[in-house]
Structure formats: C-alpha cells, structure tokens
Image (spheres, helix red, strand yellow):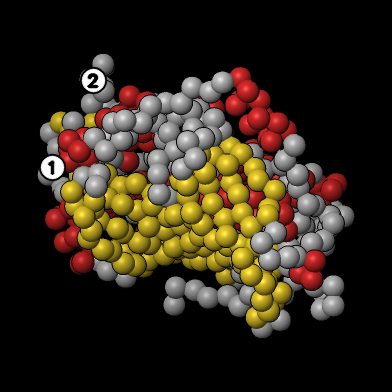
Amino acid sequence: MMANEKKWGIKELIEELSANLHRIYTSEEMAQFWGGPKFPGPFVFFNKEATRDTIVHFADGIGDLNPLCRDEAYASKTKYKDLVASPAFIFSSCSLAQAPSVKGTAIGWDAGYEVEWFRPILKGDSLDWRVMYPSDYTLKKSKMAEDSLIISTLCEFKNQKSEPVAISKEWCVSVETDKALAKDKYANIEIYRYTEDELNRIYELQDNETVRGLEPRYWEDVEIDEELPPIARGPLGLMEMIGWLAGCGSPISKPEQLWRRIDMYDRKVADPLTNAMINLELVHMDDRVGRMVGVPGAYDFGVQRVSWLSVLLTNWIGDEGFLWKLRGELRRFNITGDTTWLKGKVARKFVEDGKYCAEIKCWGENQRGEINMPGSATVILPSREHGPVVYPQARTLD
C-alpha cells in the first residue's frame, strides 16, 4: 500500500485529463514533467540518436536477428548502404507518455499501440518528438477494478532534417490499485512450468528463425492466406527484462536516489520486507511487486511485446520491404514464465497511390493457447512490374 499518499484516484484523473485535453508537449516539456525540478539533468527517455551501438543494442533487446541492423558490411550491400534501425526503435526514444496517469493510487497499464511509419530510421539519424496528452479518454466498467479509464496519447517523431518518421497512438488502462487487489481477477493464474519437450520445441523454433534479408519479396508473389513464419519470445524471465531495458531503456529505471528525485507525487510504495521505497518499474522485474498491484507476477512492458510483433513483419518482408502500419492490442498480462508466439497471415492485397501493399492479420499467443495480443499490420512491398517501394505520405499532430 501507499504510505503518506495523497488520494489520487479515477475521479481526480478525469478532472486533470479534461483540463488538459489535446495539450501538446515538446520533448523538453515532457522530460521536465518526468524529471522534475529536483533531477540533476539532463533527463532523457533513452535513445535520441541511431548510432551503430544503439541500433545493435535495441536489436539485442528484442532478439532481432536481422543483419540489416547488426552487420555494417552486410548493410553496405543494400539500397540503404548502411545500418538501418528496427522500426520499433522509435519506442526507445519515447514510449511512456501517459505521465499524469501514474499519480497516486491510479496505476496505468499499457493496453495497446498503433504506429504508422513514413520513412526508415538510418544510422546517423537523431529523433525528436512531440506528444499530445491526452488525445482522448474514456471511462469504462472493468472486471479487474470496477471503473477503468482508457487514456490515449499521440506521439510524432521527426529526424534531424525535420522529416516525419512516424506517428504513434498508445493507450493505457488506469485503475485504482486497491480495487484491483480486492477483485483479484488473476488469482487462478499460476506461473507455468514447462516439460523438457515443450522447452525444446520453443528453442527449436527460435534457433531456426529466418530473416528474408536481401532476397526481395515481391508483391506479385504474395498470396492471400499465406502464413508468415512464426517466431517465439520467452519464456519470459528477468533476463528478457534486463535485455529490453539495455536496448530500449525506461525513463524511470533509475537508482533509488535518482528515483526519489523523479517521483514528484509522493508515491511512497513500501517494500513489505525492507520498508524501503520501491521503484514502480519493479512490477516488470520482481514477482512480489507485480503481485502488489494485482498481477500474478512480474510482467512484460507492453511496448516490448509490440516490438516483438514488428520483428515478425520485418523478418518476412525483407530488406526491400517497408513496415507501414502496425497495431497491437494488449489483452492479457504476459507474466514471468510465459512464452509468446508471434504469428500472422496475409488478409488482403491492394494498391494505394502507387504503393503495393499487403494487409496482415497478426497476433501474439501464449503457451496456454490464449491470444495475448491481437493485431494487424500493413506492409509495402516492391513490385516486379512497378519497381521499388513507394513510401507513404507523412502526417503530423498538426
């Protein structure tokens, strides 16, 4: 429970959201919001520049095997002539924009991401961004904690040339922690214990993951209902979370003396064993802390799972293809021990303004057979008849 806390529940959140609807923050303003006046600065969300190191570290963090973002000699043979970051690299620049939703007793969980990319992220690019928070909010009844508040955010990314790179929508679910604990919706879920045969099947799939690479996947060769080769991530453990943080980072994964400077809202979450203050990010790394907020154990970052889904697509489209749109809805917690299989199939083909596109139905599925992330994507492919990919028309918050 929170000690010495200021009561800040759903009602107070709605009042603040209503007063600030459609407010746009620059990256500097949002960093000040998160870092606060006591932080020694500069406060950064994580990656600003796509260097060789940051591109490779991010690939490590999501298990991306693509040599286009790893091997400079390989990348020099492609049309890009150098390393290209994973499209999901934008999340390492900004992915935690629901700032006021972490106040008081109302905890926020990632519920989904929808991204549209306009150009690739090349080595040497630097990213800046603006956030519209909130872009929308909706009050709903929740099986987990009575009322829940769905809060949406829009974030635009531009490179050093002021060229739009992507625009993302992310939404979180805020509930009051004490009510989630009282409901105990996930009480019957236990951490999964695998047989050796189950583990071997997971490892075999991971060891044989294929990347299309230099061989173009032409639009004319794609067939409706064609299945994408699945990939698997997990079983989820502490090292998956450390790998993610090493590559993508988190603005509030700080040592305690810095976390206390960031924490402007008197969120005194006490460790029941030591009575010391707990950094809220530990819900992703410590099963005990996960259970303190009504989840059966530690759980993944939602944006981490969406980034895995992006790998399914980039593996399939090859170096000549372009991931245009991606949506992932985070429907179930992915807790310690869970494995997520990322799967997809072609739903339709179409041509739009010179872009030769395939729409993909994709999803994440855990070892219990549950869909933990329904999703969809649109990719642009080269055409045998009409030539290379045409990038989409950019749009911005304005």
Residue 219 tag number: none
> Is 321 situated left or right of 145 in this image?
right
Q: Position of residue 236 (x, y in %)?
A: 51, 31
Q: Residue at x 44, y 77 (%)?
A: 398
Foreground pick, 45 / 17: 17
Report crowding for label 1: few under 14, some 14 to 19, many 20 or more residues within 10 A (C-alpha). Answer: some
The type of residue carrying mark 1 is Lys
* Residue on which the image places disc 2: 272
* Residue on which the image places disc 1: 6
Q: Report if residue 366 is visible in the image.
A: yes
Which quadrant holds residue 276? top left
Using the image, determine if residue 218 lies above or below residue 296. below
Q: Residue at x 37, y 57 (%)?
A: 171
Mark 2 vs mark 1: which is more N-terminal?
1
> Is 105 situated left or right of 360 in this image?
left
How many marks the image carries: the answer is 2
* Secondary-structure class at tag 2: loop
Q: Nearer the viewer, mark 2 or mark 1?
A: 2
Q: Residue at x 75, y 37 (%)?
A: 208
